[in-house]
């Protein structure tokens, strides 16, 4: 066996680890509820206590583990790191290989609802029959992929690893899809290997203005920019995890309730269109994701995008590139379209789509339909 071999992998959490989790949940020490309404001081005590009790007494990790193991999973070493990935091939001979990259604080669990729709759309009543061979890696430091041992990991490094992974799987031409952290990786994949990507599909994050764009704005665009500044709210995890990720991770690694509170807080902030969090993210899927973080001990190692920076100088929106076509799930304002066109070759910019931040969890059918539409346009443009 060599370091480039692809080895089968199954999730098999030791019973002692599961027993330890349940024991810690049973012995949780609860804080008092602070004055205020709803979520304005953070995750309410009553909500978290009920969710933690559900995690302890009703959530069935073994059933979720078995369901995850229904997807073929593998490990392979790339750049000295073991990379965990799902590889689900379609029976359709015309299926397009597609690599999907999850976000933070998510994991490969983000895509479990969309995998069947992508690989076998006819069987699930999708309007389009476009099928995909699906590859879903766990980003280094997340889930069951090894963590970077040195500082400096950035999306461009992950992108190069994914290019190597697709080559190792025998895919020469393929698409790439991602949101959140994944939106950074797929653009960097296009920059790293434009000859191999037919196109990229991004949930969002392109065309967003920065301070550097202000001098070029019209008065109408400047008014929109001013309004955007008022929308910034919530706990800035980029600042928090850039400054002291190790400090906070001590609590998240020792206390499952602490980890649950932190991840639930961020998922709630990422679900602004939902009346309540579980309207946007299924409870069991949410807890499966939290459990993956807990059992894999990745509360700390998954923070590298924040302390290393998503760009060369800290936080930045995903890089633009005009090397391969780009589609987005939901287009934005004329200002955002102008900036997106400046830096990208946009082929798909729908304006009627809706959904919360983690679309594959929130609106899986709409998300898959949009991916199909995007790559359909790319295919059509290449054959004109």
Image: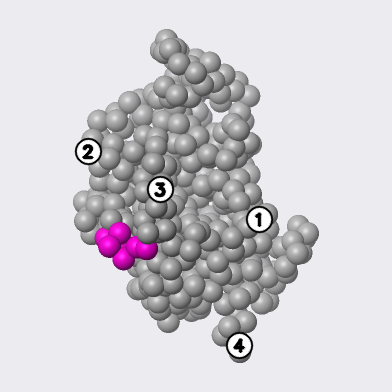
**Magenta span dominant secondary structure:** helix
Q: Say which residue label 2 marks.
A: 243
- Residue 233 rendering spot, x and y as whole percentages: 39, 37
From what the image shows, is residue 93 above or below residue 285? below
- Mark 2 → mark 3, Cα distance in angstroms: 25 Å
Q: Residues within 10 Å of mark 1 (few under 14, many from 20)?
A: some
Q: Residue at x 27, y 62 (%)?
A: 215
- Mark 1 → mark 4, Cα distance in angstroms: 26 Å
Q: Residue at x 35, y 30 (%)?
A: 253
Q: Say which residue label 4 marks.
A: 383
N-terminal label among 2 and 4: 2
Q: Residue at x 36, y 56 (%)?
A: 222
Q: Say which residue label 3 marks.
A: 228
Q: Say which residue label 1 marks.
A: 366
Q: Which one is nearer the viewer's eye here, 256 or 75?
A: 256
Judge left or right: residue 165 versus residue 62.
left
- Mark 1 → mark 3, Cα distance in angstroms: 26 Å
Secondary structure type for disc 3 = helix
């Amino acid at each position: 066996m060599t370091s480039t071999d692809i080895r089968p992998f199954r999730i098999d959490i030791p019973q002692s680890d599961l027993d330890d989790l349940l024991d810690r949940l049973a012995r949780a020490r609860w804080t008092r509820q602070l004055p205020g309404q709803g979520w304005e001081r953070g995750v309410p005590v009553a909500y978290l206590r009920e969710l933690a009790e559900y995690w302890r007494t009703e959530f069935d990790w073994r059933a979720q583990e078995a369901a995850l193991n229904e997807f073929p999973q593998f490990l392979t070493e790339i750049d000295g790191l073991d990379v965990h990935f799902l590889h689900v091939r379609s029976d359709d001979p015309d299926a397009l290989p597609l690599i999907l990259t999850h976000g933070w604080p998510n994991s490969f669990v983000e895509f479990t609802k969309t995998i069947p729709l992508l690989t076998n759309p006819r069987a699930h009543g999708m309007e389009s029959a476009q099928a995909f061979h699906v590859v879903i890696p766990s980003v280094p430091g997340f889930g069951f992929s090894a963590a970077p041992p040195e500082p400096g990991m950035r999306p461009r490094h992950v992108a190069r690893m994914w290019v190597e992974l697709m080559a190792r799987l025998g895919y020469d031409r393929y698409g790439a899809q991602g949101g959140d952290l994944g939106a950074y990786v797929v653009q960097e994949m296009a920059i790293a290997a434009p000859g191999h990507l037919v196109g990229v599909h991004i949930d969002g994050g392109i065309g967003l203005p920065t301070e550097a764009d202000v001098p070029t704005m019209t008065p109408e665009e400047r008014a929109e920019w001013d309004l955007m500044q008022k929308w910034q709210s919530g706990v800035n995890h980029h600042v928090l995890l850039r400054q002291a990720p190790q400090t906070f991770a001590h609590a998240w690694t020792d206390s499952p309730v602490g980890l649950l509170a932190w991840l639930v807080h961020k998922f709630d902030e990422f679900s602004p269109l939902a009346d309540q969090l579980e309207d946007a993210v299924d409870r069991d899927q949410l807890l499966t994701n939290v459990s993956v973080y807990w059992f894999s001990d990745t509360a700390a190692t998954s923070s590298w995008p924040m302390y290393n920076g998503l760009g060369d100088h800290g936080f930045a929106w995903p890089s633009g590139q005009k090397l391969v076509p780009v589609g987005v799930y939901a287009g934005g304002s004329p200002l955002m379209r102008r900036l997106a066109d400046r830096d990208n070759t946009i082929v798909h910019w729908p304006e009627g789509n809706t959904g919360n931040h983690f679309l594959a969890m929130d609106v899986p059918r709409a998300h898959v339909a949009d991916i199909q539409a995007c790559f359909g346009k790319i295919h059509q443009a290449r054959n004109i």
